[in-house]
Amino acid sequence: MAEYPTALGASSRERITLLGTDLANEVMGEVGFGELAFWLATQRRPEPGETRVFEAVLAALADHGFTPTAIVTRLTYLSAPDSVQGALAAGLLGGGSRFLGVTEDCGRFLHEQLTGVDLPEDDEGWDALALEVVRAQREARRLVPGLGHHVHKDGDPRTPRLFRIAEEEGLFGPHLSLFAAIGRVHPEVLGRTLPLNGAGVCGAALADLGLPLELLRGFALLARTAGLIGQLAEELRHPVANEIFLSVDLNNRSVPPTPYPNGGPHG
Amino acid sequence: MAEYPTALGASSRERITLLGTDLANEVMGEVGFGELAFWLATQRRPEPGETRVFEAVLAALADHGFTPTAIVTRLTYLSAPDSVQGALAAGLLGGGSRFLGVTEDCGRFLHEQLTGVDLPEDDEGWDALALEVVRAQREARRLVPGLGHHVHKDGDPRTPRLFRIAEEEGLFGPHLSLFAAIGRVHPEVLGRTLPLNGAGVCGAALADLGLPLELLRGFALLARTAGLIGQLAEELRHPVANEIFLSVDLNNRSVPPTPYPNGGPHG
Amino acid sequence: MAEYPTALGASSRERITLLGTDLANEVMGEVGFGELAFWLATQRRPEPGETRVFEAVLAALADHGFTPTAIVTRLTYLSAPDSVQGALAAGLLGGGSRFLGVTEDCGRFLHEQLTGVDLPEDDEGWDALALEVVRAQREARRLVPGLGHHVHKDGDPRTPRLFRIAEEEGLFGPHLSLFAAIGRVHPEVLGRTLPLNGAGVCGAALADLGLPLELLRGFALLARTAGLIGQLAEELRHPVANEIFLSVDLNNRSVPPTPYPNGGPHG
Amino acid sequence: MAEYPTALGASSRERITLLGTDLANEVMGEVGFGELAFWLATQRRPEPGETRVFEAVLAALADHGFTPTAIVTRLTYLSAPDSVQGALAAGLLGGGSRFLGVTEDCGRFLHEQLTGVDLPEDDEGWDALALEVVRAQREARRLVPGLGHHVHKDGDPRTPRLFRIAEEEGLFGPHLSLFAAIGRVHPEVLGRTLPLNGAGVCGAALADLGLPLELLRGFALLARTAGLIGQLAEELRHPVANEIFLSVDLNNRSVPPTPYPNGGPHG
């Protein structure tokens, strides 16, 4: 007979446990939501400094205004107001490679660069490693994840702030160190200065916290869930979704069909 | 030209604002994630006591083990491991009327009962109001949302705990008062004692916090997002989804089709 | 030991069955896709006339241009191009009460009106029943589902066409009869002439085909899936999603937060 | 002012067009659903033979019994019965790389192998090309998409059937030719005989039909939407989802948390 082991929630007639603790008495009222999310993902209760860095990351990623995900949630709610879960789920489905994926890409990228490498002991050492990394990416004609921003061209304000918070908490680990060094040395290789963006620094910080790399995107989605609820709350009181819809629909223009070329590569 | 006003995220070249504050300097590192979620939903920064009650609710709802939503997220990840957002979204889509809806139903129900009513000033008064409410439901052959639990038949441990936390923070408002009174008086009407369940008390507490009633389900979904990330993190290290899938598939039994009756009411 | 009976797909080493038939030899190449969808939903192979009416309904509902669902699918694909399933799922999530629900609402409404009623034998009888129905809705201050259209004010071209197809196939049953009668008599009650809309007539036709009322929305979603694939195919070759996104984002206007009123009904 | 061109649905007060035709008079009642789905995706009306091959593919992929996607749709409906769209969307979200992705992977793979190559003129030529392809995959330690099946070890019955249908319709193009040749020659390279699976042959056939390679997964999802509606219809009449849920939940076993290793690669 199959058995399904879990350390997460479990109930008996009298008691509910979560992560081996008593939910009602040891978690409710005692554990903040960011702390709990960290604990659920790692099955390890974080230190206060870890929670502070983690929650700073969640704050950095929660809402960026009228992103595609925010627009999608508002339009879905307009179309199906009976299903809040559908509106939130639809918004989260935009959390893929392009708009919300940089956090995960950057965390994974830094982790790969650090695997099997002796860690430098000072900034000079980090700069040398970063130079290698940026050169290798350039030679392979690949971008460095986390470098560049289409709006904050002179610097993303979230980046120095997260660096400082991590330093204050003694959590400026190898991923952040390499990311910061990339910020210092890349102009030497690329010939121009690009900002270290906020999504990237968040990925570096999450990796330094030891969170599962496969789920870095998941934390961005958790942050965004809070943001999308904010979008819905605003939409309820000051609706704009119908106007967005009409601004598209009223500007549609019928054109003749363009047949897709038939028959494959030799069709 | 259409304009889309928002008090949520906005960016200029140098600065990112959120809710009228400077995201990097006034939010990151300063505001916890539960506090931020409350703020985003209400556009009002909560008091520490409000945050504590709110986070206690989120903790109560984050994970309940192998619920349908948890199973769905694990199976979807098994089937499409390339899309963490899809696995989370699929799990959230189970957050509808049956398994995650009690929180919203209970908050709305209590709110309706309190609308247009002079609020009682003591327990006796609340009991009288609760009696009316339970009697009216019984006469209309409707259930009282939040009353009853299929496992915690002698009492859901989350309920007294959330009552106490709300009292400690001076946030035991009219919704919680009516809910508690329903717990005291319903045996007189129904002839048996049912527990006040945890999902219900969470709805009462969220309503007392003044959160938008239309979005109470949204907060349950936010809590659950953290829980589902925990489910995925556990699945990554101790996978069970394939075994769940096989336990169903290997026990399938082919039966002949049963034609659906044709032709409508008189077909 | 649990067993899960099903008449749908099943496999052995040599054979795949579907609905009690041999998939490879009796379904593939022999059964059209609309016919198969009908068969899967009812476990009864439809007659050719039933398939024709069913496919006419699917055609009527497949695509309506830049609806919220179409915009949502395009924006989600922009944001997460790695997940076609996410883009389609996001679009379908808009298939709720407002934009895609009329089909189901109308089918269910007509069915309720017909339940327990002796069916009229001629148009005069249908008109009398329809008069009762419209009057009762008006007295209850409820709309008649399927009546009215914001664009096709003089008549939705899909309605007479579907009436004719159903007549040609001998499938003009009680739901369509009542719907048509509502179209004839409602001006007498409402004092103005409204069109019978296409979504409504589709619901009536699906109900006359004897399809499960709980799933009428499902058929609208099936039709829409084909439409959304068309939207994605067009987006791939002539992208507009980024321009839609920018048209919203560039017209955002920051406003101060508006605090949501605290404290519930008496807060 | 932005304009959004489209050849898909458009409406005026009197008329609805789709793909440059009159929806009511030229599509409804005249065009089958498979034919319409093809037309929407390619903006080119298919020939009857193309429709037959396309619908055979859809039939092959519509339902495979209690797959993860089917279980997910049933569990989501159990949990949120108010939202059919959510149950279908949740099921489709499992349509990713593992369970539904072979169709797309195989179509793309074959297309890449054919790009820039002179097409062989006889089976001998195809066999030579296939040998090269299988050898190159083996050397790169990569699997050949579409080769192998965990149940149909002696041959997937859908494969020869789809070959035959394509031949009958004169649509056995280069993708199917290469796929068939891979079936003939791979034992010479791999040292054992594997079946050409049904998902793979469907990808080859769709590629030969000239459908957009980026959307091959989309057609598998369209087929599956019909299958998932069938699953819901069966669940409505013969429910098993609650029993599936309980079979997991009642066999859960609480284990202590296993802390995720902290601190990244050198933590």
Image: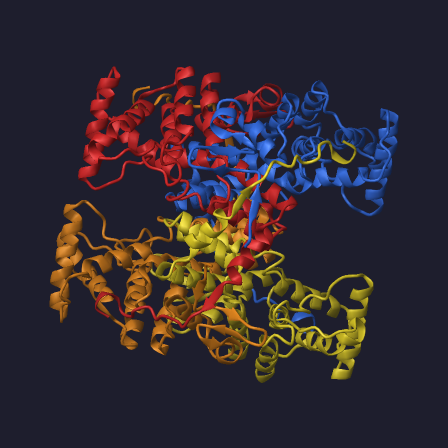
Chain colours: A red, B blue, C yellow, D orange
Q: Of B50 and A47, which appears nearest the observer?
A: B50
Instruction: Confirm whether residue A1 shows in the render.
Output: no
Q: Quadrant of the C terminus of chain A?
A: bottom left
Q: Position of residue B165 (x, y in %)?
A: 68, 21
Q: Relative to residue A200, is residue D82 depicted above or below?
A: below
Q: Relative to residue C157, is residue B27 depicted above or below?
A: above
Q: Of A2 and B50, which appears nearest the observer?
A: B50
Q: Position of residue C95 (x, y in %)?
A: 56, 57
Q: Is residue B27 left or right of residue B183?
A: left
Q: Relative to residue B127, is residue C16 depicted above or below?
A: below
Q: Of C180 and D71, which appears nearest the observer?
A: C180
Q: Position of residue D162 (x, y in %)?
A: 31, 68
Q: Position of residue A65 (x, y in %)?
A: 51, 41
Q: Is residue B138 left or right of residue B164?
A: right
Q: Relative to residue D94, is residue C49 depicted above or below?
A: below
Residue sitting at x 66%, y 66% = C106
Residue sitting at x 63%, y 79% = C172
Q: Of D267 and D166, which appears nearest the observer?
A: D267
